[in-house]
Image (cartoon, rainbow, N blue to C red):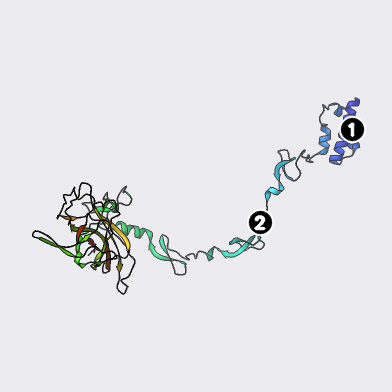
Amino acid sequence: MSDRKTTKIISWADDFKAASGFSAEFVLSASAAEWDAINGETPPSLLGAIGGRALKAPGAPDGNLAQLNATGDPVDSGIPASDIGDKATKVSGATAGNFASLDADGDLADSGIDNTAWISRIASPTEGAIPSQTSSGELVDTGILADDVSNALAALPYKATKVGSPTAGNLASLTAGGDLADSGSAPSDFTPEFNSEYTFLPIEDAVDGSSPPAALETFVAGNGRIKLRRFDPTTAEEVIFAWEMPDDADGSIQFCVCGVLTEATSPVSGEGISFQLTGYPVGLGESINHAFDPLQYSHEPDLFADGVGYQDRFRTAYSTLISAAGLDGGKLAVLKLARAVDNVNDDYAQDVGVTGIMIMWRRHQTLV
């Protein structure tokens, strides 16, 4: 046997002695013919002598879990033991069928509650019957078969056929045969109609505000005679009306101002007038002293375009809807009228005679 092979055999013998526990003499007992068959690999007889012992996993990181390959040798799993995390401790002496719960440490514990504590099963139910529930939450057998109910519903006379593919939110209508149909209209498509009522508050019923207009006078134009007060074009002169609102008023009002042009200087194109109404409601048992809340404006932006001149009657456009909080039927409405001299629509630089204000209001709609 060559020296090179002998040296390699001795080296293998030492390695396997350390790894397998076999003596060097046992390892070296292989025949020369067996060693001569070696081509740089582990001698076959030596592997046979090791038998079923598993080989080591070379190069495995410290702390990783081992797993077995197809030949039964250990290999590196690639999974550190720390990745498994904490396992819950199983319950010792648990009652079979009870629900599990967790203790303060996160381990499993016996809750002491089984399924019957949650659902009280019907002892002898009628097959196909509809169950019911007692006040304590237990299930009971009604004895009413679901099929009987279904058949009874199907046998109901004059049952309307439901609508196929309706538009969600639309109102239902009836066909000539009495079945349901999609009307094609939603509630939002309809605007409630109200019967408007009108109340005229004459200027002679008004009392002076903090900066009142000229005193009440009778304006004469030939055969025409009318009570009015002249409002100045540069000062926000004001009067106060007290209107007892009808009991069935719904609290939504609009106003306009009625009057006569008292000055010989007629308006030119584009000249107009503007008034503002402020106010507050007074209920029964309440003081009549409250702060005025801004309400709305009423304008006539072009007197000339409307053909209004000296001694002619005018009426401003109705204001937008006033829905002041608490301005309801049965209240006393304290209303302050002032000429809005700072408004862009008030540029007719003359006094105007006011005969009163017209209130447009609505009644509550009552379904009978």
Judge depth for marks 2 and 1 and give the one in front.
2
Of residues 133 and 205, the one nearer the viewer is 205
Q: Position of residue 29 (x, y in %)?
A: 89, 34
Tell me the number on the disc at residue 340. Answer: none
- Amino acid type assigned to the residue bearing label 1 in the image: Ile
> Looking at the image, which is closer to me, 126 or 155?
155
82 above or below 120? Answer: above
Can residue 299 be seen?
Answer: no
**Quarter of the image containing the C terminus?**
bottom left
Left or right of 105 on screen, residue 250: left
Q: Residues within 10 Å of mark 2 (few under 14, many from 20)?
A: few
Q: Which residue is mark 2?
A: 88
- The amino acid type found where label 2 is placed reads Ala
**For numbered disc 2, what is the local secondary structure?**
loop
Circle 1 residue: 10
- Picture quarter containing residue 127? bottom left
Residue shown at 81%/30% (left/top)? Answer: 41
Q: Is 156 above or below relative to 15? A: below
Q: Alpha carbon of mark 2 to alpha carbon of mark 1: how far? A: 52 Å
